[in-house]
């Protein structure tokens, strides 16, 4: 995820993003072994597909942007990330983790 958060604190499966006195907590729910948050620069990796060869195709600089990434070991994994903005006037008890619903069981009301 690209973000312009001015501070990103990572503690394994939890990342706290801060910007302008506001915070967002991202949590990897039921993380498989070895799955953690990391952060990096918003640049093309040497393993990324090349851009078209015409001269108009260039990556633009992403000044002030950081990439929040999830490091996932090789294998079959199911990853769920919960994003909780830390709204003024709310306490940690106000935040509820929604139920986990397998993709093949999603409906318009599967959040209930």
Image (cartoon, rainbow, N blue to C red):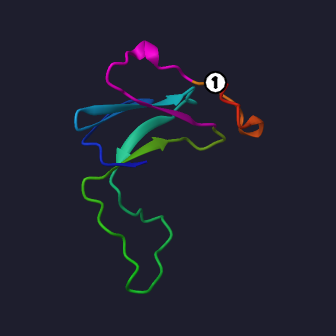
Query: Eyeballing the image, is 11 above or below 79?
Result: above
Q: Specify start and end residues of the magenta stretch as a single range.
A: 78-97
Nearer-the-camera pick, 15 or 87: 87
Instruction: Place residue 101 in its image quadrant.
Output: top right
Mark 1 secondary-structure assignment: loop
Where in the figure is residue 93, as x and y percent of width and height? 44, 13
Image quarter in which the C terminus is found: top right
Corner quadrant of residue 94: top left
**Residue 58 falls left or right of residue 96:** left
Of residues 89 and 49, which is closer to you in this image? 89
Q: Is residue 100 magenta?
A: no
Instruction: Please give the name of the residue rendered at 24% of the width and 42% of the height, measured from the top-left corner.
Output: 6
Asked if residue 7 lies left or right of residue 38, the reply is: left
Left/right of residue 109 with respect to residue 87 in the rendered view: right
Residue found farthest to the bottom: 54
Q: Residue furthest top?
A: 93
Query: Which residue is at 25% across, 53% downward?
Result: 64
- For this orientation, the residue located farthest to the right is 104
């Amino acid at each position: 995820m690209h973000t312009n958060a001015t501070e990103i604190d990572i503690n394994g499966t939890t990342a706290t993003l801060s910007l302008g006195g506001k915070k967002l907590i991202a949590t990897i729910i039921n993380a498989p072994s070895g799955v953690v948050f990391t952060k990096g620069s918003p640049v093309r990796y040497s393993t990324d597909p090349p851009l078209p060869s015409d001269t108009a195709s260039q990556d633009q600089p992403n000044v002030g942007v950081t990439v929040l990434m999830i490091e996932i070991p090789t294998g079959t994994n199911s990853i769920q990330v919960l994003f909780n903005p830390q709204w003024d006037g709310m306490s940690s008890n106000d935040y509820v983790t929604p139920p986990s619903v397998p993709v093949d069981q999603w409906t318009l009301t599967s959040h209930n």
